[in-house]
Structures are given as C-alpha cells and as structure tokens.
Amino acid sequence: MKGAVLYGPRDVRFEERSTPKIIEPTDAIIRISATCVCGSDLWPYRGLNPINGPTPMGHEYCGIVEEVGSAVATIKPGQFVIGSFFASDNTCPHCHAGYQSSCQHREFVGTAQAPFLRVPLADGTLVATPEVPSADLVPSLLAVSDVMGTGWFAAVAANVKPGATVAVVGDGAVGLLGVLSAKQMGAGRIIAMSRHAPRQKLALEFGATDIVIERGDEAVARIKDLTKGIGADSVLECVGTQESMMQAIGSARPGGSVGYVGVPHGVELDGEKLFYAHVHLHGGPAPVRRFLPELIDLVWRGKINPGKVFDLTLPLDRVAEGYRAMDERRAIKALLRP
Ligand SMILES: [Zn+2]
Ligand SMILES: [Zn+2]
C-alpha cells in the first residue's frame, strides 16, 4: 500500500509502505474510510518539531474492521469504527478515571494517512457505530476521532456550564469545534477570537455570539470590555503558544477556568501571575475515548455536524496538497480519502 511519509520541513511524500499486519493478539486492522491532516501535523511539517528520519503520518481515522487478533472480544470484522490518537486499554485506573490518553498501556496511533491501519488494544480503543454509516455522516464521524473530541475536552476542562460566558482562543478546527461544544453544553455567550472571515463565519454558524479580532493584551482588554470588566467564566485555549496561553489566562475572570488543548510550544507560566490570576487550569492531550460514545451518538442523531470543518477533500494520493493548503491557511482542515 501507499501512505503519507514526512521526510523533513514541507516534504510530505505519498509512497510505498508495508501493509500493516496483526502483531499483538489485541490488535485490529482497519480499512480507512477517511483520514485527515491535523493542525498538530503542521508542527513537524513546518520543522518546528524535529523528526528522526522519514516518519509515517496521520492519527485521525475511521473505517471498517478488516481483521482482529485472537484476544479481541468486542470489535468484529465488518464494523465501522472510530478510535483516538492514543490507543488505550480502557480498563486501567487512569482509563477508569476518564483519562484514556494517559492510559498505563497507551500507544500512539500515528500511521493513519494510509489505506490500512493497525490499531493496538482494539477493544479498549475503538467504538463501533450502530451500523455502517451513510457517506454523508463519514466526515463528522472522522471529526469525532480527534478535533471534535479535543474541542469537547477543552470545553469540559474549562468547566462550561449552561448560561456561561465562554471565550475561545484559536480559530483552527479545534477552536471552531470548541465553539460548537460550548454551544451544545448550553453556554449563554460564546466569544470566538478570529481574524479570518471564513473561520468567523463558521464560528457564528457553530454558535458564536461575538467575534474578537484582536490578539494578546488587546484581546484581553476586548474580552473585559464585552463582559463589563469581569472576564469570561470559561476560556478554551486551542493554539499552544505563549501569547495564546497568556491571552486565555488573562481573559478568564477570577474563579474562572481555562481548558487548554493546544500542544504547548515554548509556553512558560509565571508563577506569580498565575497565583494572582485566580484561575483553574486544566488540559492536556484530550481523552477522546471518554467522549466517543456520546459524540458518535450526537452525530448519529444529527444533533451536531462537526464535519463542516473539512473545507477541502482530496484523494489520499494528494496528501501533500492537503498539508500545503493548511500550512498556507487556504484550508481549515483537509479530509483525505484512500
Ligand atoms: Zn489531530
Ligand atoms: Zn488504561
């Protein structure tokens, strides 16, 4: 089979790779129905995360189970399944606490931009849909695999409550789906921070009530203006830079919460500032597995349509164009079909 391999900065190739096989008895092999390029794939693509030699890419996936190992009990060939970027046993203490992305046996699933994928710990990792979905549901089910699950976790970590005032830092796919998540959780006011017209439009469609185009301290001042000087109850940090993190902390009211899901790059927090900010901080790699059953159900019943973040669809062999379009911000998120 052929799949995506990153060779170095802005050098993604579609090339021959070995077809995955069952290695452990707890594995499953799935035939990918759709995969995509993640905002986090752009860090190594831009050379901001070093790589050690050619690296297969992709960690968002859904598809049909082809084969399972001898110890797999609940996942069956023929099912349509969705999993997360961390395989998890779903039985250890961390999984039971709802932190499957810190599972004691977690394994990163990182070769999904390909026609076939090996998923470890299949029973714990994969969730099957009630039946094989119609084609129109596939983008939204794919979104649940990471961006929707991550935006949802940002809102959960930021303690979004009905009627709350929520601010969202970041207008990538995760930030936009953070807006959708806050709306679904009953937020009264949702302030999206974005300066790109197509993303502002989607934020409004997903439930944003206000748009703030400023950044950094000016953005914080704008949030204070909009909230009678108080600040937001909940802030979703969906970028991962020093500026975005400080913007998030500064935008929260005393006693408010920041849910941070942007992978930090060079973020350092000043203990004294944090002390006087009086905010709750919670975040990390989203335990998407915790939310999969609920989010799949919301998609299945047509309550949410997170697949709208895919504004570019390409055949998998044009994966390099998907990276380019996202790098140049011509696309919010690129869906790839094998
Ligand atoms: Zn991702
Ligand atoms: Zn576990």
Image (spheres, rainbow, N blue to C red):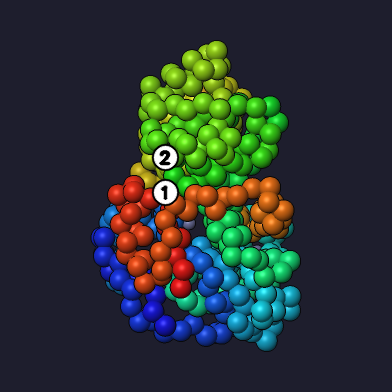
Which of these two is toward me, 117 or 248?
117
Q: CA distance from mark 2 to mark 1?
A: 9 Å
Residue position for label 2: 198
Q: Nearer the viewer, mark 2 or mark 1?
A: 2
Residue position for label 1: 332
Q: Are marks 2 and 1 in contact (CB under 8 Å)?
A: yes
- Label whose residue precedes the other's in the sequence (2 or 1): 2
Res. 283 in view: no
Q: Is mark 2 within 8 Å of ligand 1?
A: no
The residue that appears at 41% across and 24% down in the rendered structure is 219
In the image, residue 178 lies at what x, y percent? 55, 41
In the image, residue 18 lies at what x, y percent? 41, 84
Q: Secondary structure at mark 1?
A: loop
The residue that appears at 66% across and 81% down in the rendered structure is 77
Q: Is mark 1 within 8 Å of ligand 1?
A: no
Q: Left or right: where does residue 181 sit relative to residue 108?
A: right
| Picture quadrant of ligand 2 | bottom right
- Classify 278 as above or below 179: above
Identify which amino acid the numbered label 2 is placed on: Pro
Q: Left or right: where does residue 43 sit relative to residue 177?
A: left
